[in-house]
Amino acid sequence: MAFTTLEELAKHLNDGEATAAELSTAYLERIAAHNETLNAFVHIDAETTLAQARASDSHRAKHGPRPLEGLPIAVKDIFCTTGMPTTCCSNILKGFNAAYDAHVISRLREAGAVFLGKTNMDEFAMGSSNETSAFGPARNPWDVERTPGGSSGGSAAAVAADLAPAALGTDTGGSIRQPAGLTGTVGLKPTYGRVSRRGIIAFASSLDQAGPMTRSVRDTALLASVLCGHDAGDATSVADAPVIDWLQAAGRLDLYGLKIGRPREYFVDGMHPEVRQRVEEALQRCADLGAEIVDISLPHTQYAVAAYYVIAPSEASANLARYDGVRYGVRCDNPSDLADMYTRSRDEGFGSEVKRRILTGTFALSSGYYDAYYKKAQQVRTLLRRDFDDAFAKVDVIATPTSPTPAFKLGEKIDDPLTMYLNDIFTIAVNLAGLPGLSQPCGMADGLPVGLQWIAPAWREDTILGAAHAFEAATDWHRQTPEGYS
Amino acid sequence: MDVKQVAELARIRLTDEEAAEIGPQMESIIGYVESMNALDTADIPPTAHPHDAAMPLRPDVVSNTNRRDELLAGAPLAESGLFVVPKVIEGQ
């Protein structure tokens, strides 16, 4: 039964071959067997999960199944969840219990999903390796000495080892796509504004989006169909977003008539040669399926990481001002006065990467530096958007590697923040432009998964899902599983 | 860059050891960020939001119920329905 897709699990449930309670029990057993090694989950509560599963079984018996009836899903610890702790893997939120569910959590509950627990992540989603987590890093099931990527590393590790058939992640600069790429799973960052951010602990509000992480393109489409939609409680949730038929889009089997852009700036010296080769082979496969491959240029790509490391820390420095030791979270012992309480609570509660980003953002926004850094970065953001606008005048979709290398070793980059940041060089521009992006497995390099990234114009997730599904149907990379978890 | 002064603005106490570690790292990040200066952006409008969307309006109706006690339950220190903080006013 291991490594079954949501679609197949739903069929088992609908055919009466299994109950939601049995399914959740099986997953809780897998978590119990492997979580000590993988550290993918940071909060597990079998009783709560089983109560939800039994409630789902009785809902099915009385009213018939809802779209995700009885399907178990893991949730990144960044989503506010009633009945389970929410800590963003930070010591400053130790013991925090949210008073309400994130909008997407409510949507999943209403669709009948069952929550397996909260997954590990970089503290406040700031990191690319899961190593900044207050709970220690999640590990990559393909090689436990290596990172599963970040920041949604626990969700990726859980799905890759089938401790969960699917998980929720968030993506500010690549935090769904990069870990999906490094673990051989599928991850979608929807268009900015498709998914409500209400109840998702904010990192960089103009970049953050939530999305699904699964083992098939159709499962990603199924979850996206539930997660996406307008929420009046988030002013950046777009009310008149074009509606697409997610599952129909993820049914495409050939690529005739599709123009795929191959941006020369994403195939560069310094990337792992096998990663490059796997992605070139994937593009050839797409050509065999009928697509036309068009060489394009996104000329400002090399400035994306620089713009991001001004904009994201600036927004983070404002968002994280709320952790002041007053309203929630942790307060230092015996503060001598108010200033001592603020400064010591924040020193003791935040880890070093979070401090580094708050300080970088504070510096970029401070008097005398605003124009040189923040405004400049926003102008570069405009240039990056225009690059994509020009490209999408010529092609329907863009294909690139998700990351320049396969999963790196834990400890390899953590002492050098800038080297760590450059790992996200292929995913960051998508967030700055607000576009949808998806990573899917397209082969192996050094025995580790390689991710293929698809990028489409705003609101055209259907184009991405169609291309990704046709590729998946013609290959079997998504069926490769790490040893020791069958 | 005076990292201690930036830390004061951000209300984060930094020990001398932390400042000695984070200072050079921030210098390196800011140095990298300055690669943007190679671009002439004089006539380029800034992007604050990916879709240039106007802020939507909604009807001004009460939607939140009184959940004072639930919300206070997560506070490090609360009393009589209020958040408790160290004394901020000097004198008697």
Image: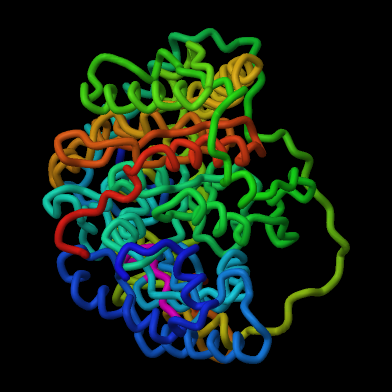
Q: Residue at x 50, y 37 (%)?
A: A470
Say left or right for A177 vs A333.
Answer: right
Q: Residue at x 15, y 66 (%)?
A: A37
Q: Which residues are magenta?
A: A84-93
Q: Nearer the viewer, residue A394 or B55?
A: A394
Where residue A199 sits, quadrant-wise, is bottom right
Q: Nearer the viewer, residue A216 or B4?
A: A216
Say left or right for A193 vs A215.
Answer: right
Q: In the image, residue B65 lies at what x, y percent?
A: 73, 82
Task: Please say if B80 is above or below A295.
Answer: below
Instruction: Give the quadrant of the N terminus of chain A.
Output: bottom left
Taking the magenta stretch, the answer to whether it contains residue A90 is yes
Q: In the image, residue A23 lies at what x, y percent?
A: 39, 79
Residue A344 showing in the rendered view: no
Residue A429 showing in the rendered view: yes
Taking the magenta stretch, the answer to whether it contains residue B59 is no
Q: In the image, residue B18 lies at what x, y percent?
A: 20, 47
Count of numbered marks: 0
Q: Nearer the viewer, residue A405 or A59?
A: A59
Q: Nearer the viewer, residue A345 or A199?
A: A199
Q: Residue at x 44, y 9 (%)?
A: B38
Where residue A73 sits, quadrant-wise, is bottom left
Task: Please say if B40 is above or below A261.
Answer: above
The colour scheme used to paint the residues is rainbow
Q: Residue at x 35, y 85 (%)?
A: A46
Secondary structure mainly formed by the magenta segment: loop
Instruction: Give the quadrant of the C terminus of chain A.
Output: bottom left
Where residue A465 sits, quadrant-wise, is top right
Q: In the image, residue A333 lies at what x, y percent?
A: 29, 76
